[in-house]
Image (cartoon, rainbow, N blue to C red):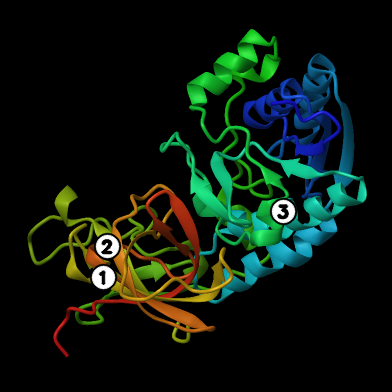
């Protein structure tokens, strides 16, 4: 199908996924314009954030494909809409996912608005996800490549955003994307995927966070009886289910040394008292909950799904999406119950609801509990 006369602005990051997205759209007949977004300026010296090299890669790819590229600086918007919320969440003892907010506030809001001002009919990105229209309504779909599916990070998109969005990689697997890039002579075909979020990059997380939030030492206590086991450097450095970095591995029960199966895991935080609670063993009951409450809800259809229906839900990007039901939902929050207990559900992360391959939306986890526990 030819799309001649239609303009699509593609967000180019310098990676293979966005590069192949632009290439495929050009082959489909679109008038393609590349747009490179600079979202972070603080200490961008090239050691940890690779934006300079990424721009070089973008320009090289654009030259091979034969498209124009524009650069735009969204650093101010990013700091105000994404990074400020990132810091607020960590200061409150939660574990946020800034990639979710970056997509809804920058890549599909600031970027979309800029592209429309340029006269674009659509925008496109290298996300592994899909979009389809049914009777004038738009659905967000899981990608065919389940190992790379990124719909989890896109659940806050609304109808107006999806109506303008193309996901060229929806039906492709990563190995095929790299093959297309190599066949087309794009040097990014073998470029390593970026990991983490740009403003942290490969730098030590504690060092970075400590620049913006002052560390506050406090006690590490055993959850069952409150016994003090050690000291933490700040609640912001820890998340539910964390094992490494607690520095209490040598704690002994009487004369018995701690074994590998007796490792300590973070099970809770008391922000007011600045206490980190831990339990021993990966399978400790305190690490498993079968229900949660989510707030800051975003439903792609514009309204909450029906309650007491079988859905699936992810509480972390890399996790499976096990069966669940929405037991209660209103404008402010919803209560989700899982068919089986989930491990280490962390407040601040997103819970994303699916019906088969369709992403319905989700919200930010406020708390987790065991609905099956005796009262």
Residue holding disc 1: 289
The answer for how far apart the CA atoms under marks 2 and 1 are is 5 Å
SS for callout 2: strand
In the rendered view, does 76 fall on the left or right side of 150? right
Instruction: Please tell me how crowded label 3 is: few (under 14), some (14-19), or many (20+) other residues with Cα within 10 Å.
Output: many
| Residue at (82, 22) in percent of width and height | 62
> Is residue 211 something one can see in this rendering?
no
Q: Which residue is situated farthest in the front direction here?
A: 135
Label pair 2/1, CB-CB below 8 angstroms: yes
| Residue at (73, 49) in percent of width and height | 164
Residue nearer the viewer, 205 or 153: 153
Mark before the other along the chain sequence, 1 or 3: 3
Label pair 1/3, CB-CB below 8 angstroms: no
Residue holding disc 2: 342
Numbered disc in front, either 1 or 3: 3
Residue holding disc 3: 108
Q: Give the quadrant of residue 254.
A: bottom left
Q: Position of residue 69 (x, y in %)?
A: 87, 31
């Amino acid at each position: 199908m030819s799309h001649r006369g239609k303009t699509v602005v593609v967000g180019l990051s310098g990676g293979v996924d966005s590069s192949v997205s632009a290439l495929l759209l050009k082959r489909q007949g679109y008038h393609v314009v590349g747009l490179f977004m600079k979202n972070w300026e603080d200490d961008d010296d090239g050691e940890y954030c690779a934006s300079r090299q990424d721009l070089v890669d973008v320009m090289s790819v654009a030259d091979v494909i034969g498209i124009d590229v524009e650069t735009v600086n969204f650093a101010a918007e990013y700091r105000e809409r994404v990074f400020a919320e990132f810091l607020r969440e960590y200061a409150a003892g939660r574990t946020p996912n800034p990639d979710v907010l970056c997509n809804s506030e920058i890549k599909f809001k600031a970027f979309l608005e800029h592209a429309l001002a340029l006269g674009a009919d659509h925008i496109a990105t290298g996300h592994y996800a899909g979009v389809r229209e049914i009777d004038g309504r738009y659905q967000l779909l899981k990608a065919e490549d389940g190992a790379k599916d990124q719909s989890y990070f896109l659940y806050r998109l609304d109808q107006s955003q999806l109506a303008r969005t193309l996901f060229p990689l929806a039906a492709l697997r990563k190995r095929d994307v790299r093959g297309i890039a190599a066949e087309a002579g794009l040097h990014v075909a073998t470029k390593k995927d970026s990991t983490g979020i740009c403003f942290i990059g490969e730098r030590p997380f504690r060092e970075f966070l400590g620049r913006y939030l002052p560390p506050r030492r406090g006690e590490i206590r055993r959850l069952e009886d409150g016994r003090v086991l050690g000291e933490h450097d700040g609640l912001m450095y820890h998340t539910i289910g964390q094992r490494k970095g607690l520095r209490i591995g040598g704690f002994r029960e009487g004369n018995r040394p701690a074994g590998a199966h007796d490792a300590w895991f973070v099970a809770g935080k008391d922000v007011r008292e600045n206490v980190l609670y831990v339990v021993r063993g990966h399978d400790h009951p305190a690490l498993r909950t079968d229900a949660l409450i989510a707030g800051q809800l975003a439903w792609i259809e514009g309204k909450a799904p029906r309650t007491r229906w079988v859905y699936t839900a992810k509480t972390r990007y890399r996790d499976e999406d096990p069966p669940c039901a929405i037991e209660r939902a209103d404008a402010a929050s919803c209560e989700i119950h899982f068919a089986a207990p989930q491990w280490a559900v962390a407040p601040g992360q997103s819970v994303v609801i699916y019906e088969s391959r369709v992403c319905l939306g989700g919200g930010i986890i406020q708390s987790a509990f065991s609905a099956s526990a005796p009262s």
